[in-house]
C-alpha cells in the first residue's frame, strides 16, 4: 500500500525575521540587486504602452530607492512616495536623494525628492484614493497575505489608478529546492502561484488584471556563490516552519553533490520565474465570473527562457 503525499504545510512567513534580514542587507543591497534592476527595466518598458500621467506615485517596497529614480525620470512632475518596512533601507534611500552638494549646487534649488515612509505593506499609512500609480517590484515574496496587500493598494489608488507589480513564481530556485533534502520540511522560500495572485486581484476589486510569466536562468560557479547572493539580498527562506540547518557536513555534502549533477560549461543553473502584472481601479469594477463562479484573469503565454 503506497503512502499518500502529504499536503504542504500552511504558508506562513516570519515577518520579524524578514525585517531583520532586510535591515542587515541594506548596507550591501545595491551590490546584489542586479535582478530587481533588470525586472524594473522590464516593468518600465511596459509603461511605454500604457497611457497614464500620474500625479502621485507609490513605490511599495522601495528598498534603497533605485526604482524611485527611474519613476522620477519617466514622470518628473509626479510626487513620489517610497514605502519600505526596513528603516535601514530607507536610510540608504535618503542618502541617495540627499547627497552632499557642492557650493554651486547649494545655490540652485534642489529637485523634489521622494517622501520616504517606514511602514508595513499590509497597513499603508496613506489616505484612500491618494495615489495614481502603485508600483511594487518584488515586494510580494515578503508576504503570505497577497490579498491583504492588494486590498490596501486598491484602497489607496484613486479611481482610474494603475497597479504594476512583479514577483517570483513557484519555479524560482527549483534546482536548489530539488538538491536540498526534503524529508523534514521546505528549505527554499515558497512563492505564490500566478493564478492565485490573479484571483486575489479580482477579489480585492481590481479590473481585468493582465499577467505574464517568463523564465530566466542565472548561473553560478558553485552552490556557495548562489547562497551568498541570497543572503546578501536578504532573500533566504523565512517560513515560520523552516528547517534549521542541514544535519551537519553530510547534509551539505549531499546538497553540493546533487546540485553538481546540473553543472554545464562549468556553471550551475538557478531558474528564476518572473511574474509581472498590472490592473486598474475602475469606477465600478465588473467581475465576469465563469458559470462555476471562477474569476477571469488574462494570462499571457509562457515565454521561452533567455
Image (spheres, rainbow, N blue to C red):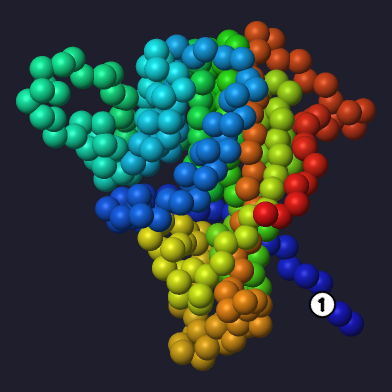
Q: In the rendered view, would you say 19 is above or below 282? A: below
Q: In the rendered view, would you say 11 is above or below 102? A: below
Which residue occupies the extreme left position in the image?
103
Instruction: Residue at 27%, 53% (x, y): give it.
Output: 27
Which residue occupies the extreme top position in the image?
283
The residue closer to the viewer here, 233 or 1, is 233
Quadrant that contains the N terminus:
bottom right
Whether residue 178 is visible to the viewer of this picture, yes or no, is yes
Q: Which residue is mark 1?
A: 3
Q: Position of residue 190 (x, y in %)?
A: 60, 57
Q: Position of residue 117 (x, y in %)?
A: 31, 30
Task: Say what secondary structure mark 1 lies in.
Answer: loop
The residue closer to the viewer here, 167 or 66, is 66
Q: Position of residue 16 (x, y in %)?
A: 38, 51
Instruction: Residue at 63%, 48% (x, y): give it.
Output: 274
| Relative horizontal placement of residue 188, taking residue 235 as reference (left or right) | right
Quadrant in which residue 90 is drawn: top left
Q: In the rendered view, would you say 184 is above or below 11? A: below
Amino acid at each position: 500500500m503506497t503512502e499518500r503525499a502529504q499536503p504542504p504545510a500552511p504558508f506562513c512567513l516570519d515577518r520579524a525575521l524578514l525585517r531583520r534580514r532586510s535591515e542587515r542587507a541594506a548596507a550591501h543591497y545595491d551590490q546584489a540587486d542586479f535582478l530587481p534592476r533588470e525586472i524594473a527595466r522590464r516593468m518600465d518598458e511596459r509603461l511605454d504602452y500604457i497611457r497614464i500621467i500620474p500625479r502621485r506615485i507609490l513605490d511599495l517596497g522601495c528598498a534603497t530607492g533605485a526604482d524611485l529614480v527611474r519613476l522620477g525620470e519617466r514622470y518628473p512632475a509626479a510626487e513620489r512616495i517610497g514605502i519600505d518596512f526596513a528603516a535601514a533601507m530607507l536610510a540608504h534611500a535618503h542618502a541617495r536623494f540627499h547627497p552632499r552638494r557642492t557650493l554651486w549646487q547649494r545655490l540652485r534649488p534642489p529637485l523634489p525628492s521622494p517622501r520616504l515612509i517606514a511602514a508595513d505593506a499590509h497597513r499603508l499609512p496613506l489616505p484612500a484614493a491618494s495615489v495614481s500609480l502603485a508600483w511594487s517590484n518584488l515586494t510580494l515574496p515578503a508576504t503570505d497575505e497577497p490579498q491583504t496587500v492588494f486590498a490596501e493598494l486598491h484602497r489607496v489608488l484613486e479611481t482610474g489608478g494603475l497597479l504594476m507589480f512583479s514577483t517570483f513564481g513557484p519555479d524560482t530556485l527549483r534546482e536548489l529546492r530539488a538538491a536540498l533534502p526534503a524529508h523534514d520540511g521546505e528549505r527554499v522560500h515558497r512563492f505564490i502561484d500566478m493564478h492565485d495572485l490573479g484571483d486575489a486581484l479580482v477579489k480585492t476589486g481590481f479590473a481585468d488584471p493582465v499577467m505574464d510569466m517568463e523564465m530566466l536562468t542565472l548561473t553560478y560557479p558553485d552552490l556557495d556563490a548562489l547562497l551568498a547572493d541570497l543572503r546578501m539580498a536578504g532573500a533566504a527562506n523565512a517560513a515560520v516552519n523552516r528547517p534549521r540547518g542541514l544535519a551537519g557536513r553530510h547534509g551539505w555534502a549531499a546538497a553540493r553533490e546533487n546540485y553538481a549533477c546540473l553543472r554545464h560549461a562549468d556553471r550551475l543553473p538557478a531558474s528564476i520565474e518572473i511574474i509581472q502584472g498590472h490592473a486598474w481601479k475602475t469606477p465600478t469594477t465588473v467581475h465576469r465570473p465563469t458559470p462555476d463562479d471562477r474569476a477571469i484573469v488574462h494570462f499571457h503565454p509562457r515565454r521561452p527562457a533567455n
